[in-house]
Image (cartoon, rainbow, N blue to C red):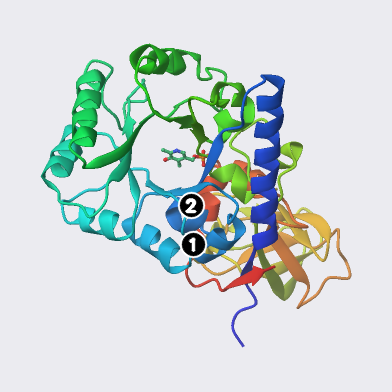
Amino acid sequence: MPRPISATVSVSALAHNLATVRHHLEQTAAAASGLPPSIWAVIKANAYGHGIEQAVTGFSKAQGLAMLDLDEAVRCREAGWGGPILLLEGFFKPSDLDLVDRYHLSTTVHNREQLDMLARARFTRRVDVMLKLNSGMNRLGFSPAAYPAAHERAMLLQQQGTLGSVGKMTHFACADGPQGVTEQLAVFNSVTHKMPGAISVCNSAATLRFADIAVSTPAQTHWVRPGICLYGASPFADAEATSFGLKPAMTLSSEIIAVQELKAGDSVGYGAIFRAERPMRVGIVACGYADGYPRHATTGTPVVVAGIRTQLLGRVSMDMLIVDLDPIPAAGVGAPVVLFGEDGPSVDEVAMAAGTIGYELLCALAPRVPVTRDA
Ligand SMILES: *Cc1c(COP(=O)(O)O)cnc(C)c1O
């Protein structure tokens, strides 16, 4: 028997979340008498830990898929995805362009070196690109001063038959927080407003809070790039995913594999950092940081055992963690445990208790955890 831990990925939750985001975009567009933007479903990092194949099925109604890794792009094609694929970091070496050509990928272009490589490449068909502006995050993209010349070069490569469409793109640093997108959006608009082409600026946070900036017109298509919300987790520290009608797509579950009866004063786990104040029962769960559960989760982190909410106690070890069984006197060895996901705490609650974000926990799911795919 394998250890009782497993992750269940719900393809229907992925599809539901995509439909929920689309509905939100349609409503926003209707209120502004415009057209809803198209959606690049972001499936980088093995679809935020959910698996590329699951994502390709769950997001079959997206207009496009976006990721970082050329290998993941190839896996999408092999899984049957025929629609647009956008490489969010672009390509890295001239030889990557063979794959771009062969698998008909679209690519972000964010530096001069990439333009040089495109200019030297020989393609069997035109390559669609999104030219990225650094509007203030200072990670990827041409500076506002360099962008017009880069755009001119891209237009020249288009005239020469190398490039197909040339769109405009940027990425927001603070769409999830009080600073919002105003400043970066103003930079983006002032640099790009006279240039033709599709626009893509919104991640999940901007898609959920500022969808009005992504309303398309008959003349100009917008593309949004939601990631985390499509997996049913929240991009915001102050809003739950369920408040947007999103459903968790990954559920991490396990079982109680041992029970200990503690006397007052007894400790449990490494470092003896939890000490019982009175006699209590604790359950040992087959899940630890080597499964991807955060070691920084502290006593009090929510866990659901046999359908009842309880808490983590003491330190998470490599393969096990300890839970309080006082609220669940009937639970013994074999009792089901949900660490996060459907019928458990949300991944965001667990992340918060560990001082991190849901993104990190989803991506951290360890390869040793078997993934079951749910319809
Ligand atoms: C990861 C990423 C996204 C999606 O971000 P979420 O916060 O998960 O929605 C969008 N655009 C780019 C360029 C990204 O790298």
The residue that mark 1 highlights is: 52
The image quadrant that residue 355 belongs to is: top right
Residue 299 on image: x %, y %: 66, 50
Q: Quadrant of residue 328?
A: bottom right
Decide which of tag 1 and tag 2 comes sooner along the chain: 2
Q: Amino acid at mark 2?
A: Ile
* Tag 2 residue: 43
Question: SS of the residue at dot 2?
Answer: loop
Cβ–Cβ below 8 Å for labels 1 and 2? yes
Q: Is residue 266 visible?
A: no
Query: Residue at (39%, 60%) from the top-left corner?
Result: 72
On-image quarter of the C terminus = bottom right
x then y, percent, for residue 298: 61, 48
Residue at point 80%, 75% (across, down): 332
129 left or right of 262?
left
Assign a secondary structure to mark 1: helix
Q: Is residue 168 left or right of residue 179?
A: left
Farthest residue, direction right: 330
Numbered label attached to residue 5 = none
Q: Looking at the figure, which quarter contains the N terminus?
A: bottom right
Cα distance in 3D space between marks 1 and 2: 7 Å
Residue 149 or residue 42, whichever sits in front: 149
Please give the name of the residue rendered at 53% of the width and 60% of the height, measured from the top-left corner: 56
Q: Amino acid at mark 1?
A: Ile
Residue 211's spot in the image, x, y percent? 60, 26
Q: Is mark 1 within 8 Å of ligand 1?
A: no
Q: Horizontally, is 41 left or right of 76 in the view?
A: right
Dot 2 alpha-carbon crowd within 10 angstroms: few under 14, some 14 to 19, many 20 or more: many
Front-lying residue, 286 or 85 = 85
